[in-house]
Image: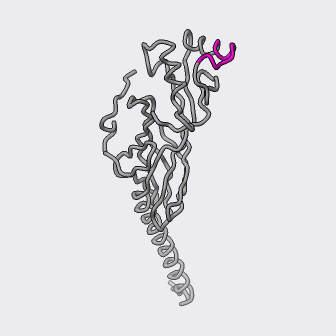
Amino acid sequence: MKKILFPIRAFLLLYLLISVGISFQSCEILQQAQGIHALSKCKFRLESVNNLELAGVGIQNKDSFSDLSLSEAGRITRAFISGPMVLSFNLDVEAKNPNDREASLNKFEWILLIDNLEMTRGTTNKFVSIPSNNGTGILPLSISFDLKQALSGESRDALLNFGFNLAGIGNRPSRITVRAKPTVYVAGRTIDYPGWIRIENEFTSGGNGGNDAPGVKTIRR
């Protein structure tokens, strides 16, 4: 049988390609690992509440039911009587990165609490890059839930007051708390933030572990 001999240049080229591939992979893993370390030091806060709607009626910057038009008041009343009374808004979560390296997250698992009562929970799959040296990034959360179901048994006036008073002065979410677990992807693997972060109006970091974060009163439906 005739032997096939590869020229030395072919072996050198193959070795070079393998070495470069390993080098690129190692560099990528190192960068992602550095990103995880940076993310663990990041701080989070609730920045603002926007586009607040109750039963499809915009109630942002409105103080009471009397501020609504007749058609808007009728729409909310009908929702209370015969249908879901959906409260929806956009909640901006701001992240600050004190590290000298960029941080990033790919997924954001969250639990929304209002007055320490769980309203709803969800997961946001969105890539967010947070610049280094105290740079900030915004992660927008789209929130929507049936307020009538969440606060079952409450009167119409109680539900209205709950919705109208949700956004504080300057649209700051003073009554809202978010329990969150950010996630990054490293070399094809999913790595969760160690524990749950309690996010409020002021920048905080760290968190407690567990599926139902400690101290949370969950409304059972």
Residue furthest to the top in view is 81
* Relative image position of residue 59 (x, y in whole percent): 61, 26
Say whether residue 195 is left or right of residue 168.
left
- Residue displayed at 33% across by 36% down: 212
User: Compared to 19, does 206 lie above or below?
Assistant: above
Which of the image's four quarters has the C terminus?
A: top left
Residue 70 is a magenta residue: yes
Q: Which residues are magenta?
A: 65-74
Residue placed most toward the observer, 147 or 126:
147
Chief secondary structure of the magenta portion: helix
* Relative image position of residue 210 (x, y in whole percent): 31, 41
Q: Quadrant of residue 211?
A: top left
Say whether residue 78 is left or right of residue 188.
right
- Residue displayed at 43% across by 42% down: 200
User: Compared to 184, does 49 lie above or below?
Assistant: above
User: Compared to 38, does 91 lie above or below?
Assistant: above
* Relative image position of residue 184 (x, y in whole percent): 46, 54
User: Compared to 25, does 47 lie above or below?
Assistant: above
Q: Quadrant of residue 9?
A: bottom right
- Residue displayed at 53% across by 56% down: 136
Q: How is the image coloured?
A: one colour
Residue placed most toward the observer, 40 or 191:
40
Total residue callouts: 0
- Residue displayed at 47% across by 47% down: 45
Residue placed most toward the observer, 161 or 57:
161
Say whether residue 10 is left or right of residue 187.
right
* Relative image position of residue 165 (x, y in whole percent): 52, 27
